[in-house]
Image: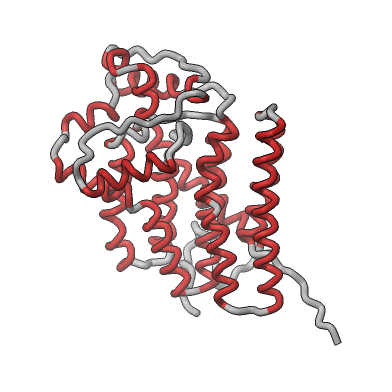
Amino acid sequence: MIRNRSIRFFAVEKLTFIYILITSIIILFLRPETSVILELLRIRLLMILGIIILAYFNSIKNWWMIRFSRFAFIGALLIYWYPETFDINRLIPNYDFLLARLEQAIFGFQPALVFCQHFPQHWFGEILNMGYFAYYPLIIGTSMYFYLKSKRAFEQFFFIVLFSFFSYYLIYIIFPTAGPQYYYQAIGLDQVNSGIFPNIGFYFNKHQTLISVGNNSGFFSQMVQHTQQVGERPTAAFPSSHVGISTIIMLLVIKNRQYFLLAFILPIYLALVAATVYIQAHYVIDVFAGLMTAFLFCYLGNLVYRLFTHKLYGIPELTAIFSRKPIKLRN
């Protein structure tokens, strides 16, 4: 007798399918080149195939290694999704001039430029660069912490973080901003110091080289520089996903009353937030936008998770993020 095996997709896999669908539609509207469209869609088909294959094998053998691989595969795709936002939006004009002008109107100067100039000390730069470099280890580390504590709590945590990433990426696609490290370089420091911030239009479509700024002699400064040279693109400045995602992680850790973990990651979080402006990756406006969207995406991500898992009403263990009871971390 042949056993009837049905493939069941995790909530994060369903969410990834939706993101693939939405971005595929956007690609058809924003990229007129047939070769580019076919290449981006081909990669998406391979990703879908990979998700289906892992889910199929999991339907045959419900081994923890296969289940874990399904989550790991979805998380690994973020390495591709981030730079791809630039491949999609590079034919949209850049909007950094709006942020720089607003920053100048609020502060009377450019904090991203003044911050590193007023604190040039090597030790200070190393601390902040260490915090910035710890961004992805922070995500992976807290994910593993929840995974070891409770598989169900981990699934909700992972979903909310992934939902937030996708939300930020959609913003980056339709509102391209490169950040001070790219924009200052494009217009020149003379104009920055004079408070002149021109509209550079499609400049970054042909110029994507990033020239490092500040003191790069320290270990973490060099690590951040090398990481940016490999994976950074002139996109994704507003709002700051570094600030947003790390804040969401803090909210989830606090909500679950994991105070030991909170004490460990709090210094990293503070250094990371400060570093986004210090290394000129973001404007201060990006930081505030990241903080505000963190609360919004955390709330919406939880609602969507409950909808995907059919737990919109009555959740015994995984309560809403802003309810009174925390998630019970137990196996």
Residue at left 33%, top 30%?
211
Q: Which colouring convention does the figure follow? A: secondary structure
| Left or right, 279 with reference to 322 | left
109 over 77 or under it: above or below? above
233 over 224 or under it: above or below? above
Foreground of the two, 139 or 81: 81
Give how far across and how far down residue 313 sits, in percent.
66, 64
| Left or right, 219 with reference to 282 | left
Residue at the limit of the structure toward the front, as seen here: 35
Give how far across and how far down residue 84 sits, in percent.
55, 40
Q: Quadrant of residue 116?
A: top left
Give how far across and how far down residue 200 sits, in percent.
46, 16
Residue at left 69%, top 27%?
32
Residue at left 32%, top 62%?
262
Question: Can residue 307 be seen in this snapshot?
Answer: no
Residue at left 67%, top 53%?
46
Residue at the limit of the structure toward the right, as seen here: 1
Q: Quadrant of residue 252?
A: bottom left
| Left or right, 90 with reference to 97 | right
